[in-house]
Amino acid sequence: MNKRAIAILGAIFILIVGTLGFLIYSKYGSKGASNNSPVTETTPLNNTDVQPTDQEYSNDQNPSGTDNTYVTAGTVIQLTTDQVVSPVLFYNGGGVTYFNRSGQLLRSDLEESNGQLLLTNQKILEVPQKPNISKILWPTQGNNYIAEIVSADGTKTWSFFDSDTVSYTDLSPKIYSLDWAMGGSKIVYIWLEGGKAYLTISNPDGSDWQTLAEMWDKDDIVKVSPDSSSILFYHGSSTEKTNAINLVSSDAKVWKELVKDGYNIGALWSPDSQKFLFNKLDNSGNKYQLWYYDLASGEAVNTGLFTTVDKAVWGADSDVFYAAEPVTGAAGSGALTIDKFYQVSLQDMSKQEYSTGNFNVDGRELFLSLDGTRLFFKNAQDGGLYYLDLNQQSPN
């Protein structure tokens, strides 16, 4: 064979090897790139390729006047595909309880495997079926609860579940709003009768009631502090330009108007009963901003987040809180949103942002693990129970 033929064969061999190498790299190299997803393959989320955009604030919206936001990449894990109603952590932190859309009460243990939480040992608890449950009010202690029932015309009523008798007691339709008190041994509510409204306390089944005071208005929402020493109240259906948040002591001897300016609604007490988060309409009147009030200083402070109390939860020390802020949509509008998560420190108003990537997350009914390393939430986009692992964060 002459030298020219050998050269041609050699060139063909090199071309074949190069082509095979390119094909192998294309096939396996692309698979390796997909492993950078913050969501594991066992917990797929609904990706609609919506790109979140950073929320910007003017100095009057951001009380610190500076950008104290730090961004980290989050890990979002789906725990169940059930459409959950009012999920809550066990008192010992070892599991979760929730209702599903079929009206069943479920209880599952939380187990960790390879750094990831899983729901195991799921049980359906035998409780009487109660139609049209929209929300569960869980006490801070005990196994009882109150079911909020919403009828077809939007009317709210409540029913007390006694875990000892495994039965419901329907509370009077004369109750306009209510909240737990004394760790779950009492309830406080607004009672409507004869064209008047009364602040009342009773046993959870409505027995042994006592009128604390007559109220000025008939549409007050009540929020009892964790230590049951104070009760916040505000109009639940006001159409005025201003809506104050007020406080009354549990013995009805001390009355204070706390937040006077602007339209304010909603309240979420801190664990130490010294602060609360609330919603305030911004200057445009179109979006709610999250503020907090400090009872000790008497100051109301803008947190700089455009969100609402139903998308927030306090840390155990009452010095930080976590919130889901929409980057698409508006909190409190009733429509679905796409959120980012933040941890906010009240000491310097610094914000730690947790990114969820391009996935649709509408975080509501937030609660923390006992050690504060996982942030659980109901994703209103699909109704499932998820959590954000606050430990597995790395700078973007």
Image: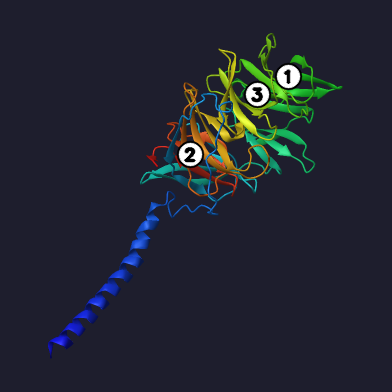
Mark 3 is surrounded, within 10 Å at the Cα level, by few (under 14), some (14 to 19) or many (20 or more) other residues, namely many
63 sits to left or right of 246: left
> How many numbered marks have been drawn onto this rendered protein structure?
3
1 or 2: tag closer to the N-terminus: 2
Label 1 to label 3: alpha-carbon separation: 13 Å
Q: Crowdedness of circle 2 by 10 Å Cα count: few (<14), some, many (20+)?
A: many
Does residue 279 show up? yes
Task: State the residue position of label 2.
Answer: 95
Task: Look at the image and tell me in which quarter the N terminus lies.
Answer: bottom left
The residue lying toward the viewer, choosing from 296 and 376, is: 296
Mark 3 or 2, closer to the camera: 3
Residue 271 is situated, as x and y percent measured from the top left of the image, at 53, 23
Q: Amino acid at mark 3?
A: Lys
**Which quadrant is the C terminus positioned in?**
top left
Where's residue 270, x and y in %?
A: 55, 23
Mark sitting on residue 223? 3
Residue at the image position 37 percent from the left and 61 percent from the top: 31
Left or right? Give the position of 12 relative to 2.
Answer: right
Mark 1 — residue?
Answer: 200
Q: Secondary structure at mark 3?
A: strand
Q: Nearer the viewer, residue 286 or 150?
A: 286
Choose mark 1 or mark 3, whichever is in front: 3
* Mark 2 residue type: Gly
Q: Secondary structure at mark 1?
A: strand
Q: Does label 1 or label 3 sit earlier along the sequence?
A: 1
